[in-house]
Image: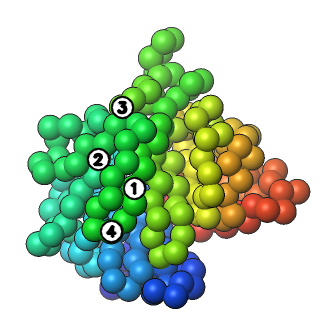
Amino acid sequence: MTGKDARFEKDVFPAPGGDLEITFIGHASLMFSDGWKVIHVDPVTAEADYAMLPKADLVFITHDHYDHLDAAALAALKKAGTEIVAGPSCAGKVPGAVILKNGQSRKIQGISIEAVPAYNIKHMRAPGHPFHPKGEGNGYIFTFGGQRIYVGGDTENIPEMADLKGIDIAFLPMNLPYTMTPEMAVDAARMFQPKVLYPYHQGDTDVSRLAALLKGEKAIEVRIRRMK
């Protein structure tokens, strides 16, 4: 790889069936691999040359905003058998995609997938008009590489997070004014207690504040990786 692609940070979680490797591409774009399958989340060409990255077995799209849904990135990642799971706002915009509503689940290519709510309560475009209305976008919980992984999508610290159980690895967005402040992310993390927490989609937010605020939470390991 060359250019920005060569600078992606990666973490590896050992697993008997094949180590889980997480690649932190940028903004909201992530890649997961267990040596057998490759999962991409919200691939966007502004963050990488996707022609240089491994093709996708499975793609998750949280919602239809331009920094999450990119037809060019999807075209570059497709191969025979690639399947796409997308949120309700993507209906009719991603040919062949499996559209999951909040609360729905599916098993695809042996991977258990749950679509969970992702929306704003506080941050609004205008009074009564949230940046991310309830029911339009998804977060995803999926079991992969021996880990139960939660990717929050564009959300705030919503009440439904208290129902999340057994999360090994979580990604929470901190991109103001569209998603969470560090304090909101702390509240979210305390609700469901992930073992490892990554801030992502952070824009110009100082993510070190999240680590400082959660310093006393010994059960939660905060890991900060380059995402911009």
Disc 1 packing (10 Å; few <14; some 14–19; many ≥20): many
Disc 3 packing (10 Å; few <14; some 14–19; many ≥20): some
Name the spot of residue 176 as percent of width and height, x first.
Answer: 57, 38
Name the spot of residue 52 as percent of width and height, x first.
Answer: 26, 79
Mark identifier at residue 113: 1
| Residue position for label 3 | 136
**Reading the chain from its start, which is encountered first: label 4 or label 2?**
2
Which quadrant does the N terminus fall into?
A: bottom left
Label 3 amino acid?
Glu
Label 2 amino acid?
Ala
Q: Residue at x 74, y 46 (%)?
A: 190
CA distance for labels 4 and 1: 9 Å
Q: Nearer the viewer, mark 4 or mark 2?
A: 4
Q: Is residue 80 visible?
A: yes
Q: Is residue 165 above or below residue 93?
A: below
Label 1 amino acid?
Ile
Disc 2 packing (10 Å; few <14; some 14–19; many ≥20): many
CA distance for labels 4 and 2: 18 Å
**Reading the chain from its start, which is encountered first: label 1 or label 2?**
2
Q: Does residue 211 appear left or right of residue 58 in this picture?
A: right
Mark identifier at residue 86: 2
Q: Residue at x 52, y 29 (%)?
A: 120
Mark identifier at residue 226: none
**Reading the chain from its start, which is encountered first: label 3 or label 2?**
2
Count of labels in the image = 4
